[in-house]
Amino acid sequence: MIRIEHLRKEYSNATPLKDVNATINDGDVISIIGPSGTGKSTLLRCINQLDKPTSGRVWLDDVEITDPACDITEVRKRMGMVFQSFNLFGHRTVIENVMLPPIELLGTPKQDAYDNAMHLLRMVGLAGKAMNYPDELSGGQKQRIAIARTLAMDPDVSLFDEPTSALDPTMVGEVQAVIGELATTGKTLMIVTHEMAFARAICTRVFYMDEGGIYEDGAPEQVFDNPVRENTRRFVRRLKVLEISIQGKNYDFLGIVSDIERYGIRNQIPPTQTYHVQLAFEELVQLVVPNLDDPKLSIVVEWSEALQAATLTMHYSGAALDVTARADKLVNSVLRASASQIEYSWVEGAELPNQIEVTIR
Amino acid sequence: MLPRPHIRPPMTNGVLGRSAQKRYTVIHIEKGMRRSHGLCARSFSTYEGAGLKRMRKILFAAMAMVVPVLLVVCAPALAESTGHSSLQELADKRIGVQTGSTFDAITRESLPNAKIEYYNTYADMVEALMSNKIDGFPGDEPVIQMIQAENPRIKIVDERMNEFEFGAVFPKSSKGEALKKELDEFIAQLKGSGELDNMTNKWTRGSEDEKTIPDYRSLPAPKGTLVMACEGQYPPMNYYHNNEAVGMEVELAARFCEDKGYGLKIDVTNFDGVLPAVQTGKADFAMSGITITDERKESVAFSDPYYVGGTVMAVLGDEAAGGSGGSGFLGGIAESFEKTFVRENRWQMLLEGVGTTLAITLLSIILGTALGFVVFVLCRNGGRIANGITGACMWLLQGMPGVVLLMILYYVVFGSFSIGGVAVSVVAFTLTFGTSVFGLLKTGVGAVDVGQGEAAAALGYHERQTFYKIILPQALPHVIGPFRGEVVNLIKATSIVGYIAVQDLTKMGDIIRSRTYEAFFPLIAITIIYFALEGLLGLIVSRIRVSIDPKRRTKDDILKGVKTDD
């Protein structure tokens, strides 16, 4: 069991981890997901002390790893790590990479270490490469050897730091298969990954990391299908978001329209859909703004890569005003022509209580 | 005697044109190589075979360079020469002067418009004169006479530039003054009996057979042994004959020590190093054709003069004055070879020089490698201040010319210890080689990916285990190639130890040149010996390089003691 309390890691130019608290139980297979730069790798490296945390504490069972008196090498022997860049020892053959650490660090008899290493190599499907040197292997093969090397130490916990990120797409599958098999053996694993489908398939628990900590922690069904929090939802649905705010009757209409255009280009949204979003925006503001004394509008455009659909959500001030109901207006018909679904709702007590959601496919 | 190539091949071997002679040389070398290959073949794998082949190529290239150089160097003998018969004619000419000698001032005084060029030995100046690089060089009368005897093309200008007196040099200490008093008494005694004149005549005009000295090595020495510094390249005052230091000054010193109950040890150093040796107490006194001047009297004490002479100018005589000469190109080479290696068993001196050079080089490599390694390992765990100090020392050592470092160590740092020149040389080159090794290790370790260290740490290796088991084995292959280059550089760099009285290969060559007055042949001979040494050490390093290559291990090496299924 790993316990993390108020872990904080500062670099001179960034603070990826502000306050991390978590308990990892034996047998947990945890996927750590989240946008770049949110400290996923840093969290793993702080757990095995490759990076020293600025403050906070980490325990492995009853041993406080962060205690200066703790012999970290003893802890690391129980905590394996697989790196993005494999880091196999270049001067040692594959078999030596796998069998020498237990001999040198655990005092395992050579014959036992060899037998176990060969067993592991067979498990990762590379027994035939035992006498090769790492630079003679492909990336996927190297990573499978690296996993075998980690397992040879029989660790209680294994940390995987983006194990497939440096691989050719054709080799990702073979490495994922090995990790997936490992996940069924009841070992405790922590895997930083960008492969959502893979994460979802093998893990028992997901950490979504954002804003300097574990932003959402839950079972994969919850985090991937029904995320509780906004950033998680945007991340797992791979949403690209554009936020627009309008205050008062004088606003830069043309500027906003061209912002939407740029947003569309940047996120590779098909041009017709971008055009429809622009139309929906134009019609909605022309319906809403003239009808308000002191208009305050907040508009959010979201593009879901997975669904290939855009939603435009507009919140605005004033009394209940369902502009979509005014079917008589010409502009409204244009709006309906570009959108596949339009919904008005009233949120009582909100700052901007009127809400219109337009879905464009 | 300089080789004197004939324009026409001699009648006796008319068929042997110049190209045939060249071919002869090449065949000879190839035979030599084959022999050495045969000697080593048993223990060498194909890899070293390739190394030998490469070495053979290098030697061929060297010979290809040497042969044309031989021709070029011999050519000046054919060049037009202009005889000068009075000092006036030399007024605005190029004059060679021995560095650190009084001839500098003397020449400036009597020939103020002359262009002065500096040389280290008379042999160099003879060579320069022969190849028309200078028009004349001044020297002490007895010396120039001896040079003329060896080299009939040289003429002495019939006009003394000045008169001078040679005196022994003592440190300005109470011990030095006491010794000086004893020597003054002794010189007065010799003068009184006419013995001093006899000695002067014997060494300047007598035949080689008469020039004997008492055996100073086995003096009883009830009052201790005195160390005399001298140049060892200044006949007839002090020079080497049959590999023994001889000369009028050596005889005077020997007689003096015998008379007063001292033992005597001769320390041979470059002329520039003679006065510092006395000043720092490395030598008790010096006699090395040192002219008594007021300027020198400020820093050292002089005995009464034991020799009075004059400065004369050596110039090139007319072509017709040529004497016996060699018989053609090959004859010239053969004569040079005989003079350099065979006569007076000079090869023994060269062998001794090779031994000294190798000893200094090998010890410096071993100690320097150890030093560089230890400092590197300490610096890995060292604090910022410690590393800063190390960095400053490295910067100082690397930036300093080797000669300066050597002199500082010899005269300043170890000035008050009785440590020999060889030991000081080893210290100096250990330091410089250590900095090189440190730098190489830094580069090599820097070239190993940081991920290697992280992976080892993550597995649970201690920092020390990580360094020795993971980092270092991967850094060494990066290091060993440049290391070979450093070794070769080191051998060459040791050629400066002559400055602190070490008789290494170069210094032995200088001593031989000072007897033969022939600059070229001994230099080439020494160069070839250096090449051979470099090749030898390079081969050893290459062998090490192969043996530390992890990929060279066989399956049996890797899985020793393991029962495999297949």
Image: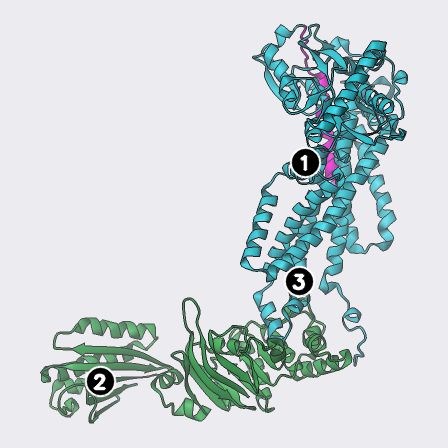
Chain colours: A green, B cyan
Please tell me whether mark 1 or mark 2 is closer to you in this view. Answer: 1
| Residue behind mark 3 | B472
The picture places residue B421, in percent across and down from the top left corner, at 74, 38
- Using the rendered image of the protein, determine whether residue B4 is visible from the camera's viewpoint: no
Indicate the amino acid at tag 2. Met
| Residue behind mark 2 | A314
Q: Are marks 1 and 2 on the same chain?
A: no
Indicate the amino acid at tag 1. Tyr
Chain bearing mark 2:
A
Q: Residue at x 66, y 5 (%)?
A: B86
Mark 3 residue crowding within 10 angstroms, few (<14) / some (14–19) / many (20+): some
Please tell me whether mark 1 or mark 3 is closer to you in this view. Answer: 1
Span colored in magenta:
B59-85
Q: Are marks 2 and 3 on the same chain?
A: no
Q: Judging from the image, what secondary structure is the residue with disc 1 in?
A: helix
| Residue behind mark 1 | B411
